[in-house]
Image (cartoon, rainbow, N blue to C red):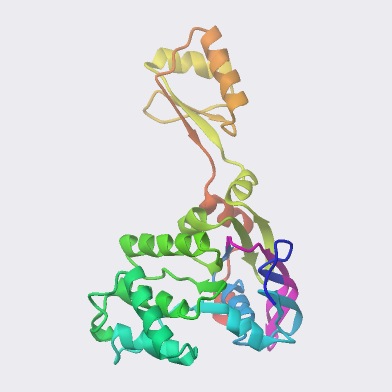
Amino acid sequence: MTTTASQPAVGVTGLRKAFGDHVVLDGIDLEVEAGTVFALLGPNGAGKTTAIRILSTLIGADGGEVSVAGHDLAANPDGVRSAIGVTGQFSAVDDLLTGEENLVLMADLRHLGRVEGRRRTAELLARFDLVEAARKRVATYSGGMRRRLDLAMTLVGDPRVIFLDEPTTGLDPRSRRTTWQAVRELVADGATVLLTTQYLEEADELADRIAVLDRGRVVAEGTPAELKRRVPGGHVRLRFPDTAGLAAASALLGGVVRDEGEPVLQVVGDGGAGSLRDLLDRLDRAGIDVAELSIHTPDLDDVFLALTTRSTPEQEGAR
């Protein structure tokens, strides 16, 4: 069975999981549309990796219903496994083998056959810029090369749903952006990606929708823009040619914040076209010149801090 236009690539209802007395997932609901990137954000111990492990059939759930690529997780785990690829937090590559040998081994495990397996291996080596290093032992690879190989191994079976658990942890900025581009290309080819990440910029760059987990529950869900609008803190920053203009604007607008030592005011606002027009019209009618204007909106850092709770040392130890 495959996903259809009306059927989500991943559907989760009431998912629960506990380890002893510690509840990790407390009845979460998720719906991931096919051909999109869906990100799970949350502090350490929020349940992100546990959710990925359940969805990829690595561990069982205590309750709830899950479908992946049209397959019921409980009734047809083999169907789920045939449709997914998984990249964990740590590279699952064999240091004693070459990059090419790692991919050939995965193709054999996927029962692709000799000809198709070698074709797929060559295609993925080229796609992830590993052709020159293909016959070198993986022990000699840099962190970025290992991560690219790990992602290539995930794709050997041409999965339609891909789970990425913190795929860029430990990578330098260049390698991280290379991985981002690979994710975008996967989605452009029709795959669905569900990723967890600690990098809020990563979720902002890649995700069509984001769910924020905190203490085993989904505390917010939406597009990056929708989540940012839920958090106060947006403002318009106005710079004036001189202190006279600063004083006049401050008196006119009221309720503004001055930047210490600079002729700058911060005016609360969402940066929408209508509110900006009204603000500039007021200043213009009063004969006050503005030298520079910039709009500042809350970012995902603000969303994360506003929506998640801070763990105590004891809670972190338990997790």
Side of 20 where 206 appears, left or right: left
Q: Position of residue 6 (x, y in %)?
A: 74, 62
Majority secondary structure in the magenta region? strand
- Residue at 30 percent of width and 69 percent of height: 129
In front of the other: 258 or 124: 124
In front of the other: 180 or 153: 153
Residue occupying the far front of the picture = 115
Side of 299 where 60 appears, left or right: right
Q: Quadrant of residue 267?
A: top right
Q: Is residue 166 magenta?
A: no
In the depicted structure, whether residue 103 falls above or below residue 37: below
Q: Which residues are magenta?
A: 12-37
Q: Quadrant of residue 264?
A: top left
Q: Position of residue 130 (x, y in %)?
A: 29, 74
Q: Position of residue 231 (x, y in %)?
A: 62, 46
Please state, as top left, top right, bottom left or bottom right, where the N terminus lies in the image.
bottom right
- For the question of whether residue 199 can be seen, the reply is no
In the depicted structure, whether residue 236 falls above or below residue 66: above
Side of 139 where 318 appears, left or right: right
Please state, as top left, top right, bottom left or bottom right, where the C terminus lies in the image.
bottom right
Q: Is residue 21 magenta?
A: yes
- For the question of whether residue 185 can be seen, the reply is yes
Image mark count:
0
Q: Position of residue 110 (x, y in %)?
A: 49, 88
- Residue at 56 percent of width and 24 percent of height: 276
Side of 279 where 127 appears, left or right: left
In the depicted structure, whether residue 122 falls above or below residue 197: below
In front of the other: 288 or 41: 41
